[in-house]
Image: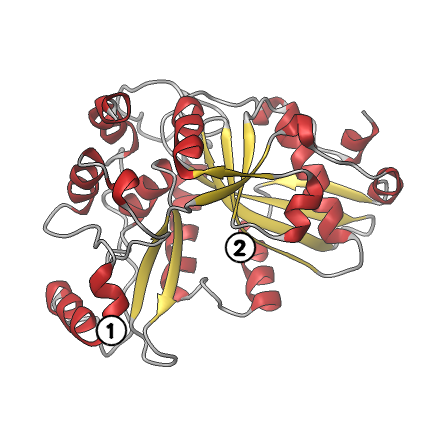
Amino acid sequence: RQAGESGRGEAARMAGHETGLAGLPEPPQGPKWASINRAYLRAIIESQIPPYRARPYLGAGQSPEEDLEQQLAAGLSLTLREDFCWSLCFHPSFVRRLCFEGFLPICSEIANGTGLYVLLPKLHTRRCVLEFSELRVPKSARKRARGFRISVNQAFGRVIEGCVEQHGEDWLHPPMRALLTQLFEWEQARGGLAFRVGATPVGCAADPPGPVGYGAAMCSFELWDKSGELVAGEVGCISGRSYTSFSGFHRVANAGSTQLLLTAKLLEKADFAFWDLGQEFEYKAKLGARLWPRAQFLERFRAVRNSPSKLAQVVQDEELLSE
């Protein structure tokens, strides 16, 4: 426990209010709730919905990130009995910090149609993770991949739309779509910190001094067919040499499986340590993914989240599966 807690101050410095991030607006609640005090809303929810009384609330007070830091230092990851915490804070800097600590940020609406949204930071008791040495690539997949091309961060907004198109809003409710887009655009305006660590593009203020590879960056992987149509993709988050999948979609046969395999080979070539696939599903197990207990996942995740990958230098094309 001491090893995990000793880096909390360092983590706060790395994942906190970087230049310009604190100034991003927080996506609003629905019209009925936008003007109501957050503490009052919390009290109403906890009084009327028993599961929320039992879950840890994150982001209380004037500084949501400080509250998160204090709860992590007190051993939240060790005492959390189920997968979920909850919060009413949707500020981009807070959600970015959650991602940097290994949480998946999930949004839920309190009863359909109310427009009252809650954040459900998820820290799985068992995380589905792919180590690239375990990746299974069927021979037939190599042939199918020749008709596709993969890219990174070329159509983030369209991939979000594709996910909603296939799955419905699910957890990608309006506040979540807005803040993910804010974080992606903020990151790209600074040259993509997850890809080009330390670079300061012309016209952008330099970020404060910090360890190489700090932060968590929203990203997208896109699959295109020969005619240039977007046929599959996914959105997720890069923290150093760890990539976490959030959601994906596909529009034509074989596109989804091809996108997964090409993304895996791309991540491997870019020196990622592993691929965090989140919740367990059969298709992930078929890729070669295994379940890691929470403690094992967090230990491995924290060990690589500050180390930069080589994603910017990797050639992105269909020949990845020919190796």
- Find residue 70 and report its image quarter: top left
Q: Amino acid at mark 2?
A: Gly
* Residue at the image point whose x is 54% and y is 48% from the top: 235
**Relative height, residue 315 to residue 37 (above, below):** above
Single out the mark in the foreground, 2 or 1: 1
Q: Is residue 109 above or below residue 148?
A: below
The C terminus is located in which quarter?
A: top right
Residue 307 lies left or right of residue 165; in this view the side is: left
Q: Position of residue 247 (x, y in %)?
A: 54, 53
Residue 197 percent coordinates (x, y): 43, 22
Measure the alpha-carbon separation of dots 2 and 1.
34 Å
Q: Secondary structure at mark 1?
A: loop
The amino acid marked with disc number 1 is Ile
Where residue 166 sits, quadrant-wise, is: bottom right
Q: Position of residue 74 (x, y in %)?
A: 17, 36
Q: Nearer the viewer, residue 219 or 277?
A: 277
Q: Residue most toward the bottom?
A: 113
Q: Quadrant of residue 168?
A: bottom right
Label 1: few (<14), some or many (≥20) within 10 Å? few
At label 2, counting other C-alpha atoms closer than 10 Å, the crowd grade (few under 14, some 14-19, many 20 or more) is some
Identify whether 229 is placed above or below 134.
below
**Residue that label 1 marks:** 49
Q: Name the residue rendered at 19%, 33% in the picture.
A: 73
**Disc 2: which residue:** 157
